Amino acid sequence: MKKKAWLLVLGFILTINNNVYAATESSCQGLLGESTMEDLTNVFKYMKILGPVLVIIYSTIDYVTALVNKDAEEYKKVNKKLITRLILTVSLFFLPIILNLLLSFINETYTTCVE
């Protein structure tokens, strides 16, 4: 259940923040408007802060639970969850760079407008 929730939140964030715009416009506010683009950029910045904090909180809870249960197999599961969470968090930071790179391969005039 937690895994599905993480994927849904991550998918939602990436969907609303990574819209493709033509660079021929003078700015990225052309399609969504200036205030909407600022709001989406702020949400993305907050998610970059909130992501690592949530990884620390959830991983701490999992490790404390495994410590209380004293189960060696549960430690392995918690370690696997931690690695997955860290990979997803790192991908959250590098996704705009990767998308801009992929879009530049397609056409030089497209960008995600996410810094």
Image (spheres, grey):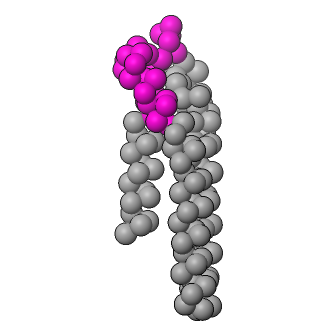
Residue at x-position 50% and y-position 7%: 26
**Residue 50 can be seen in this image:** yes
Comparing 97 with 17, the one in front is 17
Q: Is residue 24 magenta?
A: yes
Q: Please report the bounds of the magenta region as a residue range.
A: 17-44
Residue at x-position 44% and y-position 30%: 40
Spot occupied by residue 9 in the image (x, y as percentages of width and height): 41, 51
Residue at x-position 40% and y-position 19%: 35
Horizontal arrangement in the rendering, residue 64 relative to residue 3 (left or right): right
Spot occupied by residue 107 in the image (x, y as percentages of width and height): 55, 24
Name above or below for residue 79 compared with residue 107.
below
Name above or below for residue 94 compared with residue 73.
above
Which quarter shows the N terminus? bottom left
Name above or below for residue 37 compared with residue 43.
above
Spot occupied by residue 72 in the image (x, y as percentages of width and height): 62, 91
Residue at x-position 57% and y-position 54%: 53
